[in-house]
Amino acid sequence: VSSVELAQQFLDRVKREDEKYNSFITVSEEQALAEAKAADEMRAAGKATPWTGVPFAHKDIFCTNGVRTTCGSKMLENFVPPYDATVTANFRAAGAVCLGKTNMDEFAMGSSSESSYYGATTNPWGLGAGDKRVPGGSSGGSAAAVAARLVPAATGTDTGGSIRQPAALCGITGLKPTYGRVSRYGMIAFASSLDQGGPMARTAEDAALMMNVMAGHDPKDSTCIDRAVPDYTATLNEPLKGLKIGLPKEYFSDQLSPAMEEQVRNAIREYEKLGATVKEVSLPNAKLAIAAYYVIAPAEASANLSRFDGVRYGYRCEDPKDLMDMYTRTRAEGFGSEVKRRILVGTYALSHGYYDAYYLQAQKVRRLIQQDFLNAFKDVDVLMSPVTPSPAFAQGEKTTDPVAMYLEDVFTIAINLAGIPAMSVPAGFVDGLPVGLQIIGDHFSEARLLNAAHQFQ
Ligand code: GLN
C-alpha cells in the first residue's frame, strides 16, 4: 500500500475507535495526508528511512508547525505554533506521518491524564470490567493510543515519571532518556531541569528506532549534549551473560503489594536465566525524592508558566478593565486547579526568606540522590525495580487527593532528579491489568537499557 492509503486507514481507525479512549486531542487529517504524500515521494526518490510513511502521534506538548498544540490546557486552546519542536522536525525529516496530538495532563502535571482540559483519557485495559481505569500520566494519551493500536508509536515527555508510569499502566514500552540526550527545543516547558522527551512504543526495538530519530545535539537547546548518537538498534541482540543487576532495597518496600512484587521478581528471574547476576543495593536518600521534587518542579513551573499572561499568545480573558485585570483573569480562567496549585507552591518556595529553607535544601537533597545512583553504578550495570506501586487505578479515585496522586511516582521520580535514563518494560499482569518493570542505567546507557529490554521481550 502507499503511505497515503496507510495514513487514511489509520486515520479512519482513530476516528472510529478513539471515542472510547479520548487519547487524541487533535486529529490532523489534512496535514497527515500531506505528510503521507511527501513520504510516497521520498520513497519514489529512493530517499526512504525506516520511518518513511510510518504513522505515529506526538504528545500535545511538542510544538507542531501549523497544528494546534494545547499542552492539555485551556490556556493554549487556540495556539497554532509557527514552528516545529526539534523532535517534531526530526520525525518530519525522516518522513514519518503524524496523525495528531495526544491527550495529557494539563502542562504535564499529573499521573492519570485526568487534569486535561479536553477530558480524561481512558485506559484500553480493563474496559468493560467495572470502573474505567486511568492510563497513567501525564503522557496517558500516547500510552493509550499505542496500547489500543491506534498508532504503533508516540512521543512522550517525562519530568517525574510521565513516560514510564503510563507505559507501565498501559502495557507498553517507554524510555526516559538521559537529561540532555533529546532536545527540549519546542517542547513546552514544565520543569526545565527535569523534562526529557522520549519514545513510547510496543517494543524496545520500536523504541530504539524512535531514539535513532529523537536523540542528538541541538544548538537551539543549551542543555542538549553534543555527543555521538549510536544506532540504538545495533546492540539489541547483545547477550546479557554477565550483566550485573542491582535491586534497590528501598524500591521493594511495603509500598509495593505482594502481587506487584511477585511480577517484578519473576521478571528479574528471567534475567538470571539469561545469565545476569543479581544483588541488593541501597539508595539511602531515595525516600527524600518526592519531597525534593515537589519543591524543585513547582519552582521551575512557576517561572516557566509566567509567560502565559494573555499578552503574546494563548488565552486572553474577555473585556479586561486594565492590565492587572487582564493578567489575573486570564490566568484564573486559563489554568486548571492542579496547575494553579503548582504555581502557588513554586512561587512560595522561591520567595524571599523561603528560598534558602526550601529551594536550596531541595537542591542539596537532589545532589545526594544523584550521588546514591552514581555509587550504585560503581558496582552494578543496571538497576531494576517496579515502575508503580500498583496497576492502573480507577478514574476519579485519586483526583481529590493530590498527595495520593504524587505517590504514584515513588519509584520513578528520583531518576529525573539524577538525570539518568530509565525504561518501563511490560512485565505481566496483576488483576488482569498490566504492570511494568523499570530498568535504570547510568548516564547515556540508553543502548544498554534497550538491549536488556529487548532480550526480555
Ligand atoms: N506525576 C508527576 C507530576 O505530576 C510527574 C509528571 C511528569 O513527569 N510530567 O509532576
Image: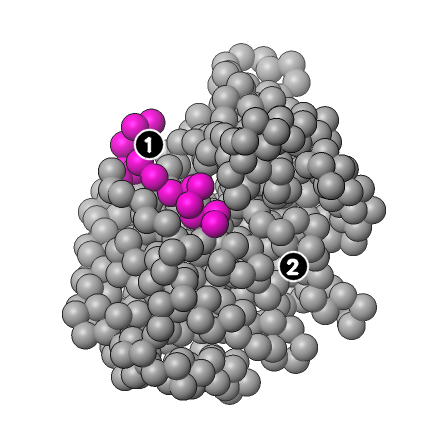
Residue 218: within the magenta?
yes
Category of crowding for the residue at label 1, using alpha-carbon neighbours closer than 10 angstroms: few (below 14), some (14–19), many (at least 20): some
Residue 34 can be seen in this image: yes
**Amino acid type at mark 2:** Ala
Closer-to-camera residue (446/368): 446
Residue 436 can be seen in this image: no
220 relative to 89 in the view: left or right: left
Residue 253 rendering spot, x and y as whole percentages: 39, 81
Tell me where residue 334 sits by quadrant: top right
Q: Is ligand 1 within 8 Å of the beta carbon of the residue shown at mark 2?
A: no
At 35% across and 73% down in the image, what residue appears?
239
Residue 449: within the magenta?
no
Determine the residue located farthest toward the right in the rendered image: 16
Tell me where residue 67 sits by quadrant: top right
Specify start and end residues of the magenta stretch as a single range.
Answer: 209-225
Q: Which residue is mark 1?
A: 218
Residue 65 rendering spot, x and y as whole percentages: 55, 24
The first of marks 2 and 1 along the sequence is 2
Residue 429 rendering spot, x and y as whole percentages: 60, 77
Category of crowding for the residue at label 2, using alpha-carbon neighbours closer than 10 angstroms: few (below 14), some (14–19), many (at least 20): many
At 52% across and 82% down in the image, what residue appears?
263
At 47% across and 50% down in the image, what residue appears?
209
Closer-to-camera residue (215/346): 215
**Amino acid type at mark 1:** Asp
Q: CA distance from mark 2 to mark 1?
A: 31 Å
Which numbered disc covers residue 419?
none
Tell me where residue 299 sits by quadrant: top left
**Element on which disc 2 rests:** helix
Which numbered disc covers residue 147?
2
Where is 311 relative to 199, above or below?
above
